[in-house]
Amino acid sequence: MASSSRADTSGVTRKLILLAVAIVVAVALYTGGWFYAASQLKERVAQELAASQQGMHAASCADLSVRGYPFRIGVFCDSVGLDDRPAGLSASFGALRSAAQVYRPGHGIIELDGPAQVRVTPDLAFDANWDLMRASVVAWTTGLDRASIAYDGLKGRLNAPSQGVSVGVSVTHGEKHVRQSGDALDVAASLDGLSLDLGNKTLPPFNMAVDMTIANAASWLSKEGPPAGVPLGTNAELRALTFDLGEGRTMTLSGPVSIGNDGYVSGTVDLTIEGIDLWRDRISETFPDAAKTVRRVASGLRALSGGQDRAVVKLNVQQGTVYLGPFAVAEIPPL
């Protein structure tokens, strides 16, 4: 009996030793594979960045590294730069951190720090910073399938001295989502607590959201990116463009719209507005030069709604001219 017991114990011990050896070997192989993949990724990214410096669209990553062992892998940069020479655009950002699960490399999470500076020739500049900015992307070899970005506490200023423009912007929370939908591109975005500083006045915070589908635009997420001239020549279905002043005072536009190659907007959209008088007063106060037109439009909306403070009307937009019934009520400048 004692001999049998010792034999059983010896067999269990050998199995435990073999299991431990197998675990050590598996960990060693996995570790070697991870670091090999990391070195290959770093080399590939470095090559792509170096090649971009010779082209029309350049990118840079200071102090490039690949981290995330053992279960993640991602690219890290101390700062990031972009240079789109044909568009005359350059941009710089703070540190970038990215991560993807090793078992799902096509789905990545990216965090980007400020401050950021974007410049467009001849003298347009946008400077911004934020508390947190995070993006999620799902990509294949041909490009992105979908992407989302969210940020908190964004503050910035747009300056264009030659145009006499200086506008400050702050957003409590913002999001944008894009995804391929067949040949089309679905786009949804929202801005909470959006406030604009126009220099001589600051607009009270409001919320804004858009939900739309752009026809034949799924290829914009490919490696080639959007075609030159976007958004000119695009057609979209505007499911909802909403402005919200709070307490139920909203303005919503929906319907098909298009932007011609000349930059003018055309389309037929439904306008639903709650709180006509408040909107009249708010817009007139912000844009005094348009006060007379705004009062006239508000009177027309009240007449069409039977004197109520809520209206649902159809607007026709032809080459940038907005018609309420037979009357032209506004002009949209070319984009």
Image (cartoon, rainbow, N blue to C red):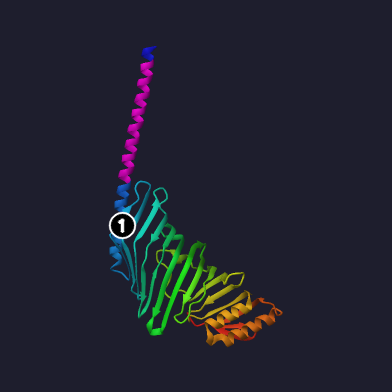
Percent position of residue 204, x then y? 52, 74
Q: Is residue 122 left or right of residue 144?
A: left
Q: Residue at x 35, y 60 (%)?
A: 96
Q: Residue at x 39, y 59 (%)?
A: 111
The quadrant in which the N terminus is found is top left
Residue that carries the numbered disc 1 in the rendered image: 44
Tell me the chief SS of the magenta region: helix
Using the image as rendered, state which of residue 246 and residue 314 is in the foreground: 246
The amino acid at mark 1 is: Arg
Is 24 magenta? The answer is yes
In the displayed structure, 167 sits above or below 211; it is below
Q: Is residue 319 visible?
A: no
Q: Residue at x 37, y 56 (%)?
A: 98
Q: Residue furthest right?
A: 306
Using the image as rendered, state which of residue 146 and residue 141 is in the foreground: 146
Q: Callout 1 environment at 10 Å: few (<14), some (14 to 19), or many (20+)?
A: few
Q: Which residues are magenta?
A: 5-33
Using the rendered view, name the quadrant where residue 58 is placed.
Answer: bottom left
Percent position of residue 53, x then y? 28, 67
Using the rendered view, name the quadrant where residue 252 is placed.
Answer: bottom right
Percent position of residue 49, x then y? 30, 63
